[in-house]
Amino acid sequence: MDHVRWLLAGWNRLSVIAIGSVVVGYAAVAWHWRQYIHPELGMDWLLAFIWGFMTLLLAWRLDLRRDLRLVLVGLAGGAVIEWWGTTTNLWHYFTSERPPVWILPAWPVAALTIHRMPVLLGRFFPGLWRLGRLYWVLLPAFVVYMSHFAWPSVGILSTKVVFALMVGVTLVAADPNVDTAIFLAGASLGIFLEYWGTSRYVWNYYTKEIPPLAAVLAHGFASVAFARAERTVSRLIPASWRGAPAPRGSE
């Protein structure tokens, strides 16, 4: 019961407003791009589960000042990632847009969700916050693996910049315990996101895998990069604007 009370205490009146606002946003996106929606195909339960889970979790333990930074970082970072991947033909969308505007709001929603997942999981599995030693195995291994995956586009300047950014994120200002937990949480959510997208042919990668492991793990790495950027921004602004510090463990 203590776990249940702790979990329920994370939602409040502000959470209800946040959920309502996000649902309105979903509806606006669906209406604007309604030509891509086919109700006659029935309910996509996997998609409903994914978005229901993310909506509930992003509204949990809200801190508007901190979360706004993460939203902006996620939106900007997601736009760069989508632009890079679609213009280098590493992946493409069924609409052939590079990238489609309708996919961009998914990035800040996912960023907020993944930011909260280690806190939730860490309550039940405290060891999640003591895996820092894995950082120097997981993150460098991912950089090598992702570089191999993206190698067909290595002659393009944007790919070289992405390679350099991955190395920089791995080596600079690491917080191994926190970053490892975020990486694992992001990759866990990435399994569902990537399987849904590739199995429904909403997007597909040049390898034709459903989905490629590199894409799944990339959600974890992107989440680490977003969290690192949010922490950096928070240090550059007055303390009164920062909001609560990012929670750890079972706080």
Image: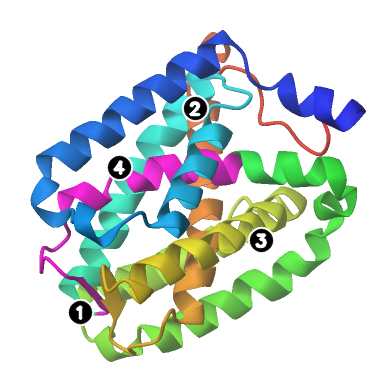
Instruction: Identify the element where label 1 is drawn.
Output: loop
Residue at the disc numbered 2:
67
Magenta-drawn stretch contains 111? yes
Q: Residue at x 11, y 39 (%)?
A: 32
Which of the two discs, 4 and 2, labels the residue nearer the N terminus? 2
Residue 209 in view of the camera? yes
Q: Find residue 157 and report its horizontal and vertical position in percent.
A: 22, 74
Circle 4 crowding by C-alpha within 10 Å: few under 14, some 14–19, many from 20: some
Which of the two discs, 2 and 1, labels the residue nearer the N terminus? 2
Q: Residue at x 66, y 61 (%)?
A: 184
- Residue at mark 3 to residue at mark 2: CA–CA distance: 20 Å
Q: Where 60 falls versus 196 (above or below)?
A: above
Instruction: Report the disc number at residue 156.
Output: none
- The kind of residue on which mark 3 rests is Leu
For the magenta stretch, what is the residue range? 90-115
Q: Is residue 14 left or right of residue 34?
A: right
Residue 189 found in image quarter: bottom right
Q: Nearer the viewer, residue 140 or 1?
A: 1
Circle 1 crowding by C-alpha within 10 Å: few under 14, some 14–19, many from 20: some
Residue at the disc numbered 3:
184
Residue 229 in view of the camera? no
Magenta-drawn stretch contains 10? no
Residue at the disc numbered 1:
89
